[in-house]
Image (cartoon, helix red, strand yellow):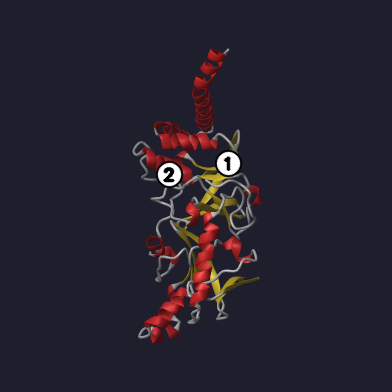
Amino acid sequence: MLFTSFVLLTLLPAVFGQSWQQYLNGLVQALNTDGLTTLASASAALNSSSAGQQVAQILSTGNWTLFAPNNQAFNSTPINLTSDPTSIRDLLSYHVVHGNFTDQTSSYPNITLGRTLLNDSSLVQLEGNESQVLAWSKGSNGIFVLNNGTTVSVVNKTAYQNVQVLVIDSVLKIPQNLSDTISNSTYDVTTSCCGITLFAPNNSAIATANCIGGLLPNNTALIALFGNHVINGTTVYSPAFTNGNNYTSASGEPFAFKTNSSGVYVSSGGSNWAGIMRSDVLTSNGVVHVIDSVLLDKKVNVSAAVSAYQSATSVAASMTTETGPVGVTPTTSAGH
């Protein structure tokens, strides 16, 4: 009896390994059946590396949403799906979102965000070692993804076991670092920083802000002004603007938000209101929100800034991975 038990124990790894491999084989077959043959080939390649196998194992339990590029999408991109297994894993991971909640998608200009599987530290540097997010919304023609200044349409829907499959017409690009993102002319932004959340005035806002020229000789005041456009240590996506949380700038001033029929506005330290023209421009280590005015707040509160950053660091250490919309409701799911 003891020998029999020992034999069974030695077989356990093979049994569990076969389980996720069967799942991956079934997913590949389903994608092929649905005409997503290029994506199917890329998914099969997950089995060629231990990191890819880990992704397949994760997918085999829980609920997921796969934003699945069709063959035409892959044909129009220079991505080589037969090269580096790590690159394939990272690309596929950014197309997979925790949970299945696209039925809760907000109508544009409101945006819904979900936490993806992408957490390669060379590509993602969010607080708490969180994985990257994906942003999407809903228009008259259905759901579309907001990706690197472009919109990617969902053109069909299907499913495989625990995975909702949303077929899209373009391959999603992984968010770049902050300096590369804001140099993209799509966003019309000239200011830059190394912060987590940046409210970035566009070119027109800076050109019409007469105070900036006067501040150039006063480096302290200029730094204070810029700091009041940044939230340190916390990535604040647009759904969180109205969730009742308080946010403090890198210069120690409180941010305020308001919403009316013309849009969403932000203010720092009781200064002027700036309209948020484009929200949730994702970067590798945070997010940029493009605004139409410079926030004319030159005040500094060092103790408040330090306290806010320490609090953000503490919160980041206990963050969990959302399985629902990011920034909307708390989650009790386990972190990665």
Q: In what quadrant of the picture does the N terminus appear?
A: top right
Could you tell me which residue is drawn at 54 percent across and 29 percent down? 23
- Asked whether residue 73 appears in the rendered view, the answer is no
Q: Farthest residue in the left direction? A: 83
Q: Secondary structure at mark 1?
A: strand
Could you tell me which residue is drawn at 38 percent across and 64 percent down? 183
Q: Work out whether residue 319 or residue 314 is closer to the camera in this orientation and state it.
A: 314
Q: Work out whether residue 155 or residue 305 is closer to the camera in this orientation and state it.
A: 305
Per the image, the residue denoted by label 1 is: 64
User: Quick check: 207 left or right of 133?
Assistant: left
Q: Please state the total of marks drawn on the protein image.
A: 2
**Would you place residue 238 above or below residue 9 in this image?**
below
Q: Check residue 90 in the rendering and tell me which mark sits there, or answer none.
A: 2
Q: Work out whether residue 152 or residue 13 is closer to the camera in this orientation and state it.
A: 13
- Whichever of labels 1 and 2 marks the residue nearer the N terminus, that label is 1
Identity, as a three-letter code, of the amino acid under mark 2? Asp
Give percent across and percent down for residue 16: 53, 26
Q: Quadrant of residue 34?
A: top right
Could you tell me which residue is drawn at 61 percent across and 53 percent down? 325
**Would you place residue 303 above or below residue 288 in this image?**
below
Neighbor class of circle 2 (other Cα within 10 Å; few <14, some 14-19, many 20+) is some
Q: Check residue 116 in the rendering and tell me which mark sits there, or answer none.
A: none
Q: Work out whether residue 51 or residue 170 is closer to the camera in this orientation and state it.
A: 51
Give percent across and percent down for residue 180: 37, 61
- Asked whether residue 21 appears in the rendered view, the answer is yes
Rounded to the nearest angstrom, the CA distance separating label 1 from label 2 is: 16 Å
User: Quick check: 91 left or right of 23?
Assistant: left
Identity, as a three-letter code, of the amino acid under mark 1? Trp
